[in-house]
Amino acid sequence: MTTTDSDHRWLVSCHEAGHAIAALELGGETNGVILTGNGGGMALSDDLHGDREAFVVAAGPAAEYLAEHHDAPDAPITTPDQVAATDIPADSHRDFATVCMFADLPTPRSSMPDDVRIARWAIAGRESDPDCWAERVDFAKYVAAKIINANTDRIVAVARQLFVRGRLSGDEIKSIHSEIKKNG
């Protein structure tokens, strides 16, 4: 499946927007989001560690339900090939700029799936207490759902732009986030 399949592209756009807005809401930085050539996506964020990082990771899957309750834009979309060929704003974060240049390629294999990242967080430091692992995963999902519910308008606005454009820089996401927060 590719990110040109409308339903899947909308789901991935909501997922990646969930990561980006959760990062901002938890005091981190978002460096950008991108849809990749294999139907995946990537959200790049910094300044988050421990619990806050786990909540941001859990926010992507938690935001997917928004795709069922909000319509994708009815607009022409930018393909991964076009994203890779488009100039990147000069002030973009270097990691985001690098990922954009390879947007037409599959998501890197080094990109760990969200559920694996959450599981590693849940186990870290508690290797000898497996009874608490599932509780920690559930807690991360609970906090992520609270973040998504409190920021639905911002996530959907970012997802709509991502759906059409195929990528958004951190500054573009922050602009959408603050504009809706100011007017909301």
Image (cartoon, helix red, strand yellow):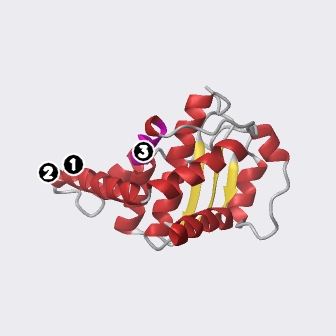
Of mark 3 and mark 1, the one earlier in the sequence is 3
The reply to whether dot 3 and dot 2 touch (C-beta < 8 Å) is no
Comparing 55 with 22, the one in front is 22
Count all numbered tags in the image, as a single digit. 3
Question: 43 or 17: nearer the eye?
Answer: 17
Please tell me the numbered disc located at residue 24: none
* Three-letter amino acid code at the position of disc 1: Ala
- The answer to whether one can see residue 147 in this image is yes
Q: Residue at x 45, y 49 (%)?
A: 60
Kindly state the secondary structure of the residue where label 3 is placed. helix
Residue behind mark 1: 134
| Residue indicated by mark 3 | 61
Horizontally, residue 142 falls left or right of residue 14, namely left
The x, y position of residue 29, in whole percent, is 55, 70
Front one among 92 and 6: 6
Could you classify mark 1 by the number of other residues whose Cα lies within 10 Å: few (under 14), some (14-19), or many (20 or more)? few
The secondary structure that most of the magenta stretch takes on is: helix
- Disc 2 marks which residue? 131
Q: Is residue 63 magenta?
A: yes
Residue 183 in percent (x, y) is at 53, 68
* Horizontal arrangement in the rendering, residue 15 relative to residue 129 (left or right): right
Secondary structure category for the residue under label 1:
helix
CB within 8 Å, label 2 to label 1? yes
Amino acid type shown at disc 2: Asp
Q: Where are the magenta residues, as a range?
A: 62-67
State the separation of the CA atoms marked 3 and 1. Answer: 17 Å
As helix, strand or loop, the secondary structure at mark 2 comes to: helix
Q: Residues within 10 Å of mark 2 (few under 14, many from 20)?
A: few
- Amino acid type at circle 3 is Pro
Q: Nearer the viewer, mark 2 or mark 1?
A: 1
- Residue 36 position, x and y percent, is 66, 41
What residue appears at the point 45 percent right and 35 percent down from the top-left corner? 68
